[in-house]
Image (spheres, rainbow, N blue to C red):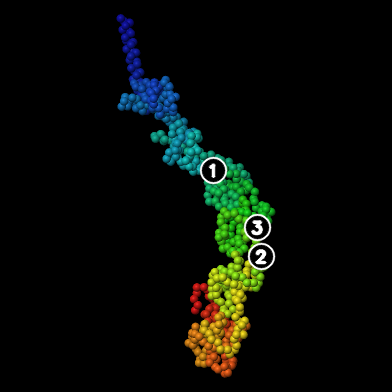
Amino acid sequence: MAKKATTNKGGEQQKSDWAAMYEETLKNFTEGAIVQGRVMNIRGEEVLVDIGYKSEGVLGAGEFRDVSEVKIGDHIEVLIEQLENDDGVVVVSKRRAEQQRNWDRVLANYVEGGLIKGVVKGRVKGGMIVDVGVDAFLPGSQVDVIPTRGGDDLMDREMEFKIIKINRERRNIVVSRRELIEEQRREQKKHLLGEIQIGQVRIGKVKNITDFGAFVDLQGMDGLLHITDMSWGRVNHPSEVVKVGQEVEVQILDVDREKERISLGLKQRQNNPWDDIERKYPVGTRVHGKVVNLVPYGAFIEIEQGVEGMVHVSELSWTKRVVKAADVLAVGQEVDAVVLKVDKNEQKISLGVRQTEANPWQRVAEKYPIGSRIKGKVRNFTSYGAFVEIEEGIDGMIHVSDMSWTRKVNHPSEVLKKADEVEAVILEVDAAQQRISLGLKQAQEDPWATIAAKYKVGQMVKGKVSKLASFGAFVEIEDGIDGLVHISQISDERVQKVKDALQPGQEVEARVIKIDPVERRIGLSIKAAKLPDEEFHVDESMLEGLRPGEDLVDLGSALNEAFGTGTGSGEEWKPGQNKT
């Protein structure tokens, strides 16, 4: 009996020990605690885990990288999220347990300013998420030293980052890749400035492009590749030569260590095409090129990479007066030209386009000998004459003095109209100056050649008053022939003003008192017309107003005065102005 009693006592003691252990175990099961568990069963998308608690924990398949790899009996760590939910089941998380362990590891091993490795795994607003064991935030401004777009090239890459902030309360880590790069670049810059020399050739990457050039990363600092050092030829914008991210082989042109500036050259890596330009393009060489730029005074033509010549507007056509190069050429147009001049020192080539064709003026003198007659169309006026197109591109000029035998022409529009078909005589040809002088009146019979035979002193004539002047009146006695009645020869009575006695258009009868075919003048007298033939004779008083030295000696000047233009006015009459 004593033995039995001892046995019962031992059983009670063992039961008490298990109860104590169970109670002690329950003390470790608190929300947020990490405990060991063993996989008990796998049911579809759920994994049951025995954690030694009164009920199993349930994990979703999403808690595992690949649930198909999980096996019954596997030991795993889980974090207790809830001891008992509404269904009486303990809620656990394998992922949160791993995050907690990683967070503890980060806090134990890393401090702000330290380095940590991680993998970029996604983009978020304002930056990127980096897996460093826990999720860390990489702000967009801290990705690189140069602006980046998207950052796809960084995805899933393991890189080193600098920890710039750890927030223990929010369990947040902020990292920077830029600061690490900048530190590396400072060391690289120091090394680069210590060894770089003028004339060296280096490989760099285009970092940024501006209107005046491109900045090239030389692995330590940036150098400036100016637009003028990109090519021996014309560069309108640096983007025509280089692109951001492009690797280029450049030459060191200048180094300013105090200001930490480096000047680079790209064209210096190529032969200068101007070195033997005079040998390649001697004067007279015919070349083919493309128009690359137009300016008011001419066009620039690229005849090879890095070599441009300029065609002045005066060298574009033999026959056309080109005001702007853009009137006959366009950018991108291919043209032939002839080298007129080469200046190696100034790197200038003068070209001529018209020299690629025969000069039509070289045959003008043979084709249009002096005295020959031509027909043409009035093309344009100047104040001193009219231009007549003899053939396409060839104009002749009729001076106002060669327009009429009988009148002084102040402006060509008094005789001609634009587009009029006229016949003229070649008076002079100057092929060198590209000028042809024409005569309109020379193509007509000179009426004064027969005046002396048609009219005699004392002859009675009839005509109409054509013009009035202060000194007398002009009377048209036949088409184009005027005679002058001096104010003293209008009436027996004294005439104070011509307009008091005569009016334009009035028909009058007069006697011829003077004929001068050389000076092209006819003197008339209305007063003498009243005398019988037997009583008429010319005396000195009749010719008083027509003597040499008087204003009336030059009939043209007299006509000017009658028109109110020319003498004394200081201005030429222009089309559109009214005669006074």
Seen at 59% across and 78% down, the residue is 405
Q: Which mark is residue 344?
A: none
User: What amino acid is found at the position of numbered circle 1 in the picture?
Assistant: Gly
Q: Name which quarter of the figure residue 451 lies in.
A: bottom right
* In contact (CB < 8 Å): disc 3 and disc 1: no
Give SS at disc 3.
Answer: strand
Classed neighbour count for the residue bearing mark 1: other residues with Cα under 10 Å, few (<14), some (14–19), many (≥20): few
User: What amino acid is found at the position of numbered circle 2 in the picture?
Assistant: Gln
**Towards the viewer: 567 or 197:** 567
**Towards the viewer: 572 or 440:** 440
Measured as percent of width and height from the top left, residue 261 is found at: 56, 47
Q: Does residue 544 appear in the picture of this structure?
A: no
Measured as percent of width and height from the top left, residue 60 is found at: 38, 27
Report the mark closest to the observer, 2 or 3. 2
Question: Disc 1 marks which residue?
Answer: 245
Classed neighbour count for the residue bearing mark 2: other residues with Cα under 10 Å, few (<14), some (14–19), many (≥20): few
Q: Earlier in the sequence, mark 2 or mark 1?
A: 1
Q: Which mark is residue 362?
A: 2
Report the mark closest to the observer, 2 or 1. 2
Give SS at disc 2.
Answer: helix
